[in-house]
Image (cartoon, rainbow, N blue to C red):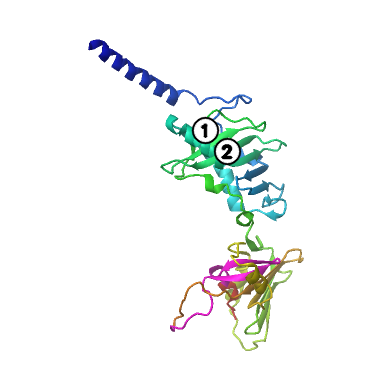
């Protein structure tokens, strides 16, 4: 009896020691250049020159830093959203290991990583990636993300970890998406500082056409068709209206249109045409706005059924049909005169 009791206490003691060893021993080292299996973070994200993301469905996104430019390039064709790139860099700097994957979950997590993990290659100026991340799903509490570290030679760590980002509660995998439409920079008008020199607004249904220009002395002038010779002009209102064109974004490049509907939208006359340019016209932005049928019935202040969607409009921009929010564009369509 006493012998069995001593054996029971011994087993408890050994179990406690094993747990403490797993919890407090430095994380296991990979057999690749002596890099620790938990070394996910990038201490200096200013050195990150390229990020490549690939998923198991064939989606890919290549983000490259352009020296001297405000925005990264996307797949060598477009500009990438600055906020989304900054979020990736922030994640790379602040990511930490929350804990090892519990032993009972290792087999399942490894299987999920092998089948559905996103691969993220992080470059720091060299042709080969400095780190390779394999990003899985969230853990059961949705407070961490299963991840596995790899290197340029295709080696991977012996075990995955549950990672998180300091100061953030949630999982990280959704930040590493591959949809090109979601990655693309959404700026329609982008004139930082005092670079905006001119604006033209054409309201085709009312035949109102007006232009605002800044001359070489910095004075703002305007003219309109039809002219309003006796109109009282609020100079401050005109200046505020002009400034609203400095930075305006579309909502999404995903227009949700079928091929036949898209062909129709491309030929419909616009309701509005907006243009803006800088001093030497080296940057000129044009966008045509079109009414969008409502997705549900809405009514105006007089109780009449609205014929158009009150939240969104279609826009033709650089040969594409995109969606814009009326919240962002309505202020540009209201005449200050």
For disc 1, the neighbor class at 10 Å (few under 14, some 14 to 19, many from 20) is many
Q: Is residue 49 left or right of residue 305?
A: right
**Is 38 in front, or is 293?**
293
**Is 177 in front, or is 103?**
103
Say which residue label 2 marks: 134
Q: Tag 1, which secondary structure?
A: loop
Q: Is residue 316 magenta?
A: yes
Q: Indicate whether 210 appears above or below 196.
A: below
Q: Tag 2, which secondary structure?
A: strand
**Is 205 in front, or is 202?**
205
Q: Indicate whether 242 appears above or below 300.
A: above
Q: Is residue 319 magenta?
A: yes
Please report whichever mark, 2 or 1, sits nearer to the chain's N-terminal start. 2
The quarter of the picture where residue 324 lies is bottom right
- Residue drawn at point x = 65 percent, y = 32 percent: 154
Q: Position of residue 305 (x, y in %)?
A: 47, 81
Q: Residue furthest bottom?
A: 230
Say which residue label 1 marks: 160
Q: Position of residue 336 (x, y in %)?
A: 59, 78
Q: Is residue 218 visible?
A: no
Q: How many marks?
A: 2
- Residue drawn at point x = 63 percent, y = 32 percent: 151
- Which region is colored magenta? 302-329
Distance in Å between CA atoms under marks 2 and 1: 9 Å
Quadrant assignment for the N terminus = top left
Q: Is residue 234 left or right of residue 280?
A: left
Quadrant assignment for the C terminus = bottom right
Marks 2 and 1 close (CB-CB < 8 Å)? yes
Q: Position of residue 70 (x, y in %)?
A: 67, 52
């Amino acid at each position: 009896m006493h012998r069995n009791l001593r054996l029971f206490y011994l087993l408890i003691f050994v179990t406690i020691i094993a747990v403490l060893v797993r919890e407090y021993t430095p994380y296991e080292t990979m057999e690749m250049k002596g890099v620790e299996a938990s070394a996910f973070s990038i201490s200096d994200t200013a050195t990150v020159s390229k990020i490549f993301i690939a998923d198991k469905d064939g989606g890919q996104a290549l983000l490259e830093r352009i020296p001297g430019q405000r925005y990264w390039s996307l797949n060598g064709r477009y500009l990438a959203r600055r906020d989304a790139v900054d979020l990736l860099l922030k994640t790379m700097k602040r990511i930490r290991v929350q804990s090892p994957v519990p032993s009972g979950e290792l087999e399942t997590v490894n299987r999920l990583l092998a089948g559905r993990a996103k691969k993220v290659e992080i470059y720091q100026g060299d042709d080969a990636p400095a780190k390779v991340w394999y990003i899985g799903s969230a853990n059961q509490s949705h407070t961490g993300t299963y991840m596995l570290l790899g290197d340029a030679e295709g080696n991977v760590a012996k075990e995955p970890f549950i990672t998180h980002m300091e100061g953030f509660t949630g999982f990280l995998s959704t930040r590493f998406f591959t949809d090109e439409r979601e990655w693309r920079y959404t700026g329609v008008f982008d004139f930082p500082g005092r670079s905006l020199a001119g604006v033209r607004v054409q309201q085709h249904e009312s035949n109102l056409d007006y232009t605002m220009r800044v001359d070489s002395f910095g004075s703002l002038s305007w003219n309109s068709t039809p002219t309003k010779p006796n109109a009282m002009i609020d100079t401050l209102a005109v200046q505020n209206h002009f400034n609203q064109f400095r930075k305006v974004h579309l909502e999404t490049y995903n227009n949700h249109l079928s091929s036949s509907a898209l062909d129709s939208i491309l030929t419909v006359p616009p309701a509005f045409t907006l243009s803006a340019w800088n001093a030497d016209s080296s940057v000129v932005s044009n966008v045509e706005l079109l009414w969008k049928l409502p997705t549900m019935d809405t009514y105006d202040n007089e109780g009449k059924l609205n014929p158009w969607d009150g939240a969104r409009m279609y826009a033709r921009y650089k040969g594409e049909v995109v969606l814009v929010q009326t919240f962002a564009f309505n202020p540009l369509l209201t005449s200050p005169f």
